[in-house]
Image: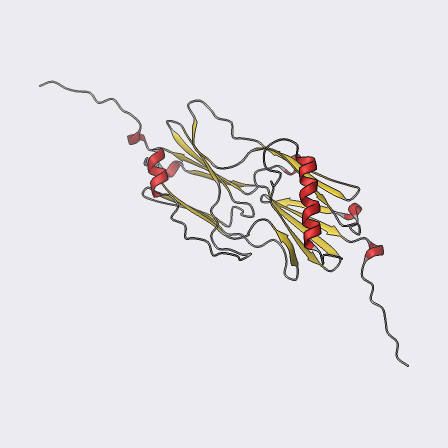
Amino acid sequence: MLFANNYYFDRLRREMDELFSGLAHSSEFPPVNLYTKENELVMTADIPGLEAEYLDINCKDNILTIRGERKPQELGENQSYIKCERSCGKFNRAFSLPKDIDSEKIEAKYKNGVLILRLPVAEAAKHKKIKVSGE
Amino acid sequence: MKHEIDKKENTVPKPKPKHVHEKNLMPHVDIIENGANILVLADMPGVDEKSVEVELERQELKISGKVTPYVPEGYTPVFTEYKQGNFQRTFTLGDSINRSGIKAVMKNGVLRLTLPKSKDVQPRKITVLSE
């Protein structure tokens, strides 16, 4: 798994975000963390307040998109906001995944407002240990 | 009431810089009010109903949530855009609350707190008698 050049990956990610983000609002929602271990990438995102079925995750041609909508609280009679810090609205983020990720085997789990994506490396691209025989 | 909340807010200790697992992050909140209730919505992703705590001491409301880091040991971060840590925030309420009517629900990382205002706060007409 080549992550020797984080800068390249970072730039690619930003360009993808700009391409897909469309209008105003942050192309940076939801914020994500990316972790790696041998033969697997794990991406986590903090997206509180959604129902799992309204979270739309797609992967095509190694481009992963995370899409959804945070609905605002409906105000009832005589209700008014004293403080409004939580963002709401549609979000759409795209990431360009390395070629060796097997998009068919991506797993997504959403629990307590946290999205966890497991992105495994395809079998063919895995590190294979080569046995050394002695004479 | 808005001024009272703003004045005494943010009694959370300042976070330590540059560390992936930072202590005591401040959750974003929405506070909605009408004549009878105060509704507090707090974003605390990673917190469930067992790890959240709501304390009301006189006029001070404290919300806290414990987060178990959700990535197992042995992984190296490639890039991190947000920090993980426990949540805590304190507010001073302008009105007195009817404690027995407080409702707290934790769902999908959002705490929904309904605080009914106590009856003495709601305007009541006083009859004047003549001697």
Give residue B36's quadrant in the image: top left
* Nearer-the-camera pick, A5 or B62: A5
Colour approach in the figure: secondary structure
Q: Residue furthest bottom?
A: A135
Q: Is residue B56 left or right of residue A47?
A: left
The residue located at (77%, 44%) in the rendering is A62
The residue located at (25%, 22%) in the rendering is B125
* Nearer-the-camera pick, A18 or A123: A18
The image position of residue B44, as x and y in percent, is: 52, 45
The image position of residue A31, as x and y in percent, is: 60, 45
Could one spot residue B71 in this view of the protein?
yes
Could one spot residue A55 in this view of the protein?
no
Q: How many marks?
A: 0
Position of the C terminus of chain B, as image quadrant, is: top left
Give residue B116's quadrant in the image: top left
* Nearer-the-camera pick, B98 or B77: B77
The residue located at (47%, 56%) in the rendering is B16
Q: Is residue A126 left or right of residue B88?
A: right
The residue located at (80%, 61%) in the rendering is A127
Q: Residue furthest left?
A: B131
Q: Residue furthest top?
A: B130
Position of the N terminus of chain B, as image quadrant, is: top left
